[in-house]
Amino acid sequence: ASLSAKSVGRAGTLRLRGGQNDHQMDDREIARTAVFSKKNRLSMTLSDFMRERCLSNPKDEATKELECIMNGVQAACRLIADMVGKAGIQDMTGLAGTGENVQGEEQKKLDILSNDVFKDKLAKTGCMAFLGSEEEDEAIHITGKHGGDYVAVFDPLDGSSNIDAAISVGTIFGIYKANGAKTFPLVKGEAQVAAGYCMYSTSSIMMVTFGEGVHGFTLDSSLGEFVLTHPNVKMPKRGKIYSTNQGNLPQWPSGIKTYFEKLTTGEGESKTKYSLRYIGSMVGDMHRTLLYGGIFLYPADDKNKNGKLRLLYEANPMAMLAENAGGKASTGKERVMELMPTKLHDRCPIYIGSAEDVDECVKYVNA
């Protein structure tokens, strides 16, 4: 009989039961049963986690395909983490000299290298039909023996303008089904089957969701594996930190200006004076928000009428993570994941974080 992890007794031992007592587990239960002591927690790798999902759903082909895709994501993130760590001593900092990408941004050397790595590792999974990257003008169609039926959208190195200063950067990705599409399918974020990011900082941490909770895995470089360190992440209902580029405040709508005036003086709904923390890398700022609560926002303004951040490969994956951790993500008018994209590089405003903080902020957006 196949084995399924069961709940843990006071002694901290893992009990396995088979035969008629087997049952399917969702991601939350898989994570719970993996965490009984520091030693055991660090022995649960992302590969183990994905394998357990397959064993718990042996007839579900989609679960097996996601395992394969995540193997590719892991491999890419390990390589990018290594490149980021060695950038300063291997001449991988600075501009690439290739000019601007489709976003009108100067490409860094690591932008191009990270993009190549992510494309290569995902293509080799044999599961992908299309790859949509921030660094590519158009989506890439994968055919032949490596062709599959999934779409991956990604920002291979978010916050790369910080790389020369050795400040945290990261990779953001979202996965959804192509459903046999012959051209790049544009879908709402709620169609995603997986989303996550990998932050490269003092440690490399991957936060991932498959629609049933959020779990964090930290790269153990001695093992070459991501190990479970943040099971069942839950965002506080309200935080005490706001994260935004406040230098843009003069261009923001009057309602948002009023919101910040109340937030910074302790006159908001919580009667708490909030503190500003802003890295300038969405991955870094969202990682803190996911763990500590609060709000991250990048409103539309006079310069960016449709917002600044990209819907498909920045806003949607982060929105899926936030909602699965108990938070919210809004454009100010609707859930981020309900917004229908019209092209690969669509932008949108975003207000994301603790549920009560987002609800309060949106009231001022629409004031």
Image (cartoon, rainbow, N blue to C red):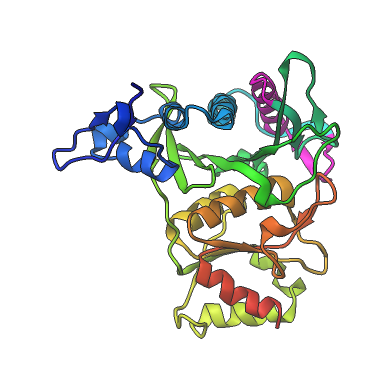
Query: x%, y% of residue 260?
Result: 60, 77
| Residue placed most toward the observer, 70 or 164 | 70
The quarter of the picture where the C terminus appears is bottom right
Side of 302 where 274 appears, left or right: left
Can residue 318 be seen in this snapshot? yes
Query: x%, y% of residue 363?
Result: 64, 79
The quarter of the picture where the N terminus appears is top left
Residue extending furthest top? Answer: 145
Residue extending furthest front? Answer: 20
Side of 103 where 151 appears, left or right: left
Query: x%, y% of residue 224?
Result: 44, 22
The image quarter containing residue 184 is top right
Q: Residue at coordinates 18% horizontally, 41% vertically from top-left?
A: 9
**In the image, is residue 84 above or below residue 287?**
above
**In the image, is residue 102 above or below residue 50?**
below
Side of 161 where 354 appears, left or right: left
Can residue 281 be seen in this snapshot? no
**In the image, is residue 231 above or below residue 126?**
below
Residue extending furthest bottom? Answer: 267
| Residue placed most toward the observer, 49 or 26 | 26
Query: x%, y% of residue 193?
Result: 61, 41
Magenta stretch contains residue 325: no
Q: Residue at coordinates 76% horizontally, 31% vertically from top-left?
A: 130
**In the image, is residue 234 above or below residue 150?**
below
Q: Which residues are magenta?
A: 99-127
Q: Residue at coordinates 54% horizontally, 47% vertically from top-left?
A: 211
The number of numbered badges drawn on the structure is 0
| Residue placed most toward the observer, 317 or 275 | 317
The image quarter containing residue 174 is top right
